[in-house]
Image: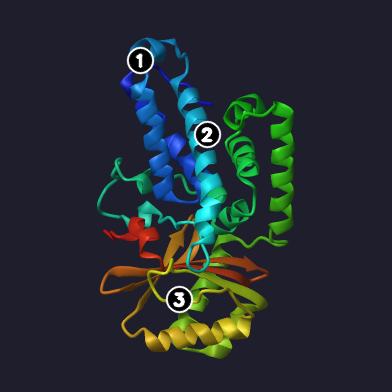
């Protein structure tokens, strides 16, 4: 899993790759950073003689990070049962647009994230439906192309068992995939129409944009007010959105990429209050994921 020299530069160069793996495994940038920090702490805690024996430190770090993430995923299930309301992955900004003007901060985890189809909110939500072992096997093999022999070291299982886990996870992804993909331009247009309809409090326009069976899921973590259960049905979602608009004077909506896809960011007085992601099928919104938990919005705290 990766290769690098044993020197400090070689070890440091692995960090971005490992952080990207950890975020996809955990769905939390904060937890991913903690896992990577722990892996590096274990590396530097090794006796120098032991480190010198390790031919590919990157592979060692990846394996250790994978094991740490597996433990975190196991304990996360119990924690999320106590979570107030729905738990959603942490949304990521696109630093080329959100952090414009401030340069790249290599110490900021959000600046090290590669945004592609494997970090869309829809994809991360599907990953949440997997068992910890399925998620690790699938992400490491199907997303990052690690061989099953190395994944077996992470999971403590045979290569054949890891293949079965990845296949099971793959079936979950196929079941959840949208039947029709929408080009990026079409997605951006749909999101723009949602923004315009929301700003004008036009319920009829929102209903037209939403699939009749659309679902909105919100994550406030018990720290801010939001719907504790998913809202089902385009008409109900439209009514809810307009009711929120009535209660949120001074809220400004911005069209911004969220996890690499067109999304909306709501801010008041320059502070981000909400980040919304969308899934679109046949030009209509089928899913809306709304993150309001301020602890999950830390990467959005600066707009250059």
Classed neighbour count for the residue bearing mark 1: other residues with Cα under 10 Å, few (<14), some (14–19), many (≥20): few
Locate the C terminus and report the quarter of the image it occupies: bottom left
Residue 258 locus on image (x, y percent): 46, 60
Q: Assess whether mark 3 and mark 1 are in contact (beta carbons under 8 angstroms).
A: no
Secondary element at image label 2: helix
Where does label 3 land, which residue? 226
Q: Is residue 37 left or right of residue 178?
A: left
Secondary element at image label 3: loop
Q: CA distance from mark 1 to mark 2?
A: 21 Å
* Closer to the camera in the image, 181 or 148: 148
Residue 2 locus on image (x, y percent): 50, 25
Quarter of the rendering containing residue 300: bottom left
Where does label 1 land, which residue? 47
| Above or below, comparing residue 276 to residue 207 in the picture | above
Q: Residue at x 69, y 58 (%)?
A: 176
Where does label 2 land, which residue? 67
Mark 3 or mark 1, which is nearer the start of the sequence?
Answer: 1
Mark 2 or mark 1, which is nearer the start of the sequence?
Answer: 1
Mark 3 or mark 2, which is nearer the start of the sequence?
Answer: 2
| Above or below, comparing residue 171 to residue 284 in the picture | above
């Amino acid at each position: 899993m990766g290769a690098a020299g044993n020197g400090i530069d070689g070890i440091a160069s692995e960090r971005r790759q490992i952080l990207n793996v950890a975020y996809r495994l955990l769905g939390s940038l904060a937890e991913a950073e903690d896992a990577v920090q722990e892996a590096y702490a274990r590396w530097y805690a090794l006796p120098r003689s032991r480190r010198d024996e390790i031919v590919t430190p990157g592979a060692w770090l990846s394996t250790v990070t994978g094991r740490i993430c597996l433990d975190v995923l196991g304990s996360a299930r119990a924690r999320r049962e106590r979570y107030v309301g729905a738990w959603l992955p942490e949304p990521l900004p696109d630093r080329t647009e959100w952090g414009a003007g401030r340069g790249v901060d290599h110490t900021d985890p959000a600046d090290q994230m590669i945004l592609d189809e494997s970090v869309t909110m829809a994809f991360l939500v599907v990953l949440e439906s997997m068992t910890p072992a399925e998620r690790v096997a699938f992400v490491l093999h199907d997303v990052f192309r690690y061989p099953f022999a190395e994944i077996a070291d992470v999971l403590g299982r045979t290569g054949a068992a890891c293949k079965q886990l990845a296949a099971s996870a793959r079936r979950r992804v196929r079941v959840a995939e949208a039947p029709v993909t929408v080009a990026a331009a079409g997605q951006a247009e749909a999101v723009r129409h949602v923004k315009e309809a929301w700003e004008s409090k036009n319920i009829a326009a929102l209903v037209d944009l939403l699939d009749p069976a659309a679902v909105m899921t919100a994550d406030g973590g018990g720290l801010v007010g939001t719907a504790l259960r998913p809202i089902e049905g385009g008409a109900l979602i439209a009514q809810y959105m307009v009711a929120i608009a009535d209660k949120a004077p001074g809220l400004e909506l911005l069209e911004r990429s969220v996890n690499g896809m067109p999304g909306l960011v709501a801010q008041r007085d320059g502070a981000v209050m909400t980040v919304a992601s969308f899934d679109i099928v046949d030009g209509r919104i089928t899913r809306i994921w709304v993150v309001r938990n301020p602890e999950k919005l830390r990467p959005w705290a600066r707009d250059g």
